[in-house]
Image (spheres, helix red, strand yellow):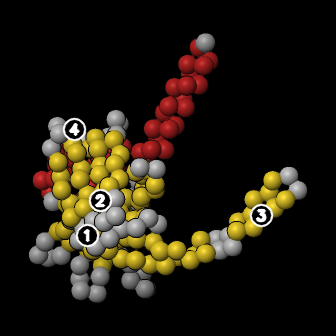
Amino acid sequence: VMNRRVLFLMLLLSVSFIELNAQKIYLDRIETDGRHQIMTKAEDFIIDGDKFSFGMKVIESSFNKVWLLLISSYHYISNSTEVLLKLGNDDIIYLPVNNVNVGEVTLPGYGVTVGSITQISQPKKVNYYSSVYELCEDDMNKIDTYGIKKVRISTGVKYRDKTYSNNLLGKYITKSRKIIQDRLDNPLKSKSLFDD
């Protein structure tokens, strides 16, 4: 019984450690116009049975700092998409889409074998939708404080809902914001071609 408890505790600690270190900076660059862009690695969330990838980005210039929530999927996202985030205190954050980009990607083929029969699926081209939503500091502070208990995405065709009992999406946004802000406060030191 004692060994099981120790094993369970070690497993719990390792999962927590992996979760804490899973999020990281995916992109950090200075654009040609001088703006600083930082983005975290996207994370997948299942909403109404379909997969959507959420990411966070900031674009900082000498004039302002714009925080963006990124949502992408193989499922249709239109130029009229709207997102509602229901917080733990029942406040609603409304996010109209700022921009949608549609790219074409090729899904690889695969084979499925059942007994002595193998069915081959050919590679196919599909659309991949990437959408952008602006988040203000006040809304992010509310997410930090109350968490997110429900998300609704109106993709232009239908509503997709997901209720969270564990604030999973809220934790992702809060952690991403912290990681990005830490990088803004402690920028990478760039080397010249001849350093070292």
- Check disc 4 and give the amino acid type: Gly
Local secondary structure at mark 1: loop
In percent of width and height, residue 22 lies at: 45, 51
What is the distance, in whole Å, between disc 3 and disc 1 at their CAs? 39 Å
Which residue is situated farthest in the right direction here? 116
At x 86%, y 52%, the residue is 115
- Residue with the mark numbered 2: 154
- Does the CB distance between marks 2 and 1 fall below 8 Å? yes
Relative placement, left or right, of 90 versus 109 is left
At x 65%, y 74%, the residue is 123
- Sequence-wise, the earlier of marks 4 and 1 is 1
- Does the CB distance between marks 3 and 2 fall below 8 Å? no
- Residue with the mark numbered 3: 119
In percent of width and height, residue 38 lies at: 31, 68
- Sequence-wise, the earlier of marks 2 and 1 is 1
Relative placement, left or right, of 58 versus 46 is left
- Residue with the mark numbered 4: 88
Q: Is residue 140 above or below residue 189?
A: above
